[in-house]
Image (cartoon, helix red, strand yellow):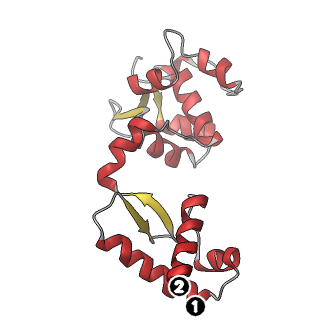
Amino acid sequence: MEQLKSRIEAVLFVTAKVLQINDIAEILEENPEDVEEALLELIMDYASREGALEIDDENGYILQVKQEHLDIVEKLCPVELKPPVLKTLTVIALKEPIRQTYLKDLRGSNAYEHVQELVEKGLVSKHKDKNGRSFNLKTTPKFAEYFKLKGDIRALVKTLNIDNGVKDDEEQRNPDEK
């Protein structure tokens, strides 16, 4: 059992993504019931130590840094953004301040999830607009620092070679200035 636990730990460490029991069993060519038993023991092992790592089992299984140590990780590791989230961030940067509802029209309903991720990473701030019906979105100083931007935010588009497909619409660009 100890060897299986070590092999499962290696899989979780290397993949760094959420896996299901059947995924782990297939990778290790092991019986799913044995993998589940070893995985539960491994979770208990991590929970009993006072280390910085844990196995989260909310939507599958992933080895991750405990919440109380994320500030250290953020200092040492750059923010990783998936291409759709990066495109949403680009639109926000080019059109800021931009209403979240307008962003949804431009980028689709996934824009809400993208905005939440960007707010959590500290790259975007959101505040209720004057009507209280939507949010205005803006980039933060962390955004400019991360992308090493000084002055014109449009440099981001050139840097990332992204075509944002957005017209320069002054009414949407400055939603509270009418």
Q: Residue at x 59, y 39 (%)?
A: 105
Q: Residue at x 41, y 26 (%)?
A: 142
- From the top left corner, tell me how far across and down residue 125 is, in percent: 38, 33
Please state if 52 lies on the left or on the right of 57 as rendered: left
User: Residue at label 2?
Assistant: 36
Any part of residue 77 in sight = yes
SS at badge 2: helix
- Say which quadrant the C terminus sits in: top left
Q: CA distance from mark 1 to mark 2?
A: 5 Å
Residue sticking out furthest to the front: 3
Residue sticking out furthest to the top: 151
Image position of 42 with respect to 33: above or below? above
Q: Residue 102 shows which numbered tag?
A: none
- From the top left corner, tell me how far across and down residue 112 is, in percent: 50, 46
Q: Dot 2: within a 10 Å radius of its alpha carbon, few (fewer than 14), some, or many (20 or more) residues?
A: some
Looking at the rendered structure, the kind of residue marked 2 is Glu
User: Residue at label 1?
Assistant: 33
State if disc 2 and disc 1 touch (CB < 8 Å): yes
